[in-house]
Amino acid sequence: MSNSAFQPLTMLSEDEQMLFDSVKSFAEERIKPLSREMDEKAQMDSAIIKEFFEMGLMGIEVPEKFGGAESSFFMAILAVEALSAVDPSAAIVIDVQNTLVNNAILRWGSDQVKEKYLPRLCSSKIGSYALSEAGSGSDAFALKCRAEDKGDYWLLNGQKLWITNAAEAEIFIVFANANPEAGYKGINAFIIERDFEGFSVGKKEDKLGIRASSTCELILENCKVPKENVLGEVGKGYKVAIETLNEGRIGIGAQMIGVAQGALDAAVQYTQEREQFGKAIATFQGVQFQLAEAATELEAARLLVYNAARLKDAGQKFIKEAAMAKYFASQAAQKITSLAIDLFGGYGFTKEYPVEKLFRDAKIGTIYEGTSNMQLITIAKQLLS
């Protein structure tokens, strides 16, 4: 058997390396100069989003017949990682589009739904994934949003909270319960367009981090949804939610290793330039040990994320590995971004340098798409089943 059969996890193919390098260059050249302003204004630059579509980053796995790049899940993960090292807010736009919205439609959508929505999502329309509610976070199936079968259409009523990309999105996957007595087995997934009667986007949250990424509430007041816009089987919305989020967690893991890499790169550069006691602080063993430990944790996180993504592409089980990747990478990102501020000293506490922003951006990793405690529950269940 040839050695190529045993490819190291972090060894990228020519196509993978090309994508990573091109996205990294784009992030450095186009996003970095705008990052601070987008953070302060809590607004994504519309020109950046337009370029995401032009680069083919909004439909990475989608088949070419629907206008996508027909590439791998791993490619999407690489794009998220590369962008996150510069601006995690920009990365989450393509992350949600690829790992949640497109993924769910590709897997659960009827031929009619795929033909109608995937070309739009690949070319010009942002998608959003709406599961959370005020009283439904970690208990994802305690949904109050209701769906009523009206024969020719569905009627939805309720509110959604913490919905990423909602300010810019025009296509939403919304979860609602049509039969509360049946518990989670009454949940359905619906595709809703922004201009549907009875649908509106509400308050935009003023957040600690990933500020340029919009997070809003959704309001459904007798929102009419066509019958054909149910995603997957009626009563199987819980399955759509769980299985899509399993994949989405790998995307958040990729975001977190990108954040950590950006912070570590900045810290390494700064410690080699900053002088105290007549020499660069990077020459002090105490600093070297901290950098070495951070680099080791980051590499371990990257291996977990890459392994989960490659398992997904190989059609293997990856639930436990996805939860491990998301859990460990988010913990590592918080630790490494905090260390970067320490090593920058007083400068790290100012907005003049990038590590302050990366520190704020990292915090969300332990919360969204399943808190750290929920990841530990998932890992334990897989171990004990």
Image (spheres, rainbow, N blue to C red):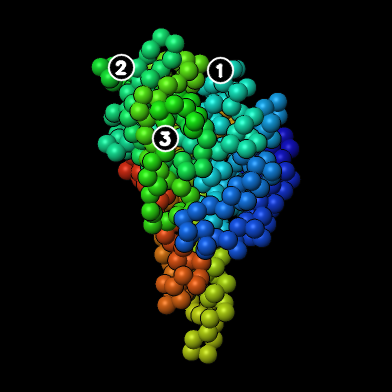
Q: How many marks?
A: 3
Q: Which residue is mark 1?
A: 110
Rendered-image quadrant of the C terminus: top left
Left or right side of 94 for 56: right
Residue type for callout 2: Asn
Identify whether 261 is placed above or below 20: below
Front residue of 325 and 218: 218
Residue type for callout 3: Ser
Q: Determine the image quadrant of residue 243.
A: top left
Q: Position of residue 244 (x, y in %)?
A: 47, 31
Q: Which residue is mark 2?
A: 179
Q: Position of residue 190 (x, y in %)?
A: 45, 24
Which residue appears at 74% of the width and 45% of the height? Answer: 14
Look at discs 3 and 2 and give the one toward the viewer. Answer: 3
Q: Position of residue 162 (x, y in %)?
A: 38, 42
Front residue of 14 and 157: 157
Which residue appears at 51% of the width and 46% of the height? Answer: 92
Badge 1 density bin: few <14, some 14–19, many ≥20, Cα 10 Å? some
Rendered-image quadrant of the N terminus: top right
Disc 1 or 3, which lies upstream in sequence?
Answer: 1
Measured in 3D between alpha carbons, the distance from the residue under mark 3 to the one under mark 2, in whole angstroms, is: 24 Å
Q: Which residue is mark 3?
A: 200
Residue 231, disc = none
Identify whether 108 is placed above or below 352: above
Which residue appears at 71% of the width and 40% of the height? Answer: 4
Disc 1 or 2, which lies upstream in sequence?
Answer: 1
Disc 3 or 2, which lies upstream in sequence?
Answer: 2
Measured in 3D between alpha carbons, the distance from the residue under mark 1 to the one under mark 3, in whole angstroms, is: 26 Å
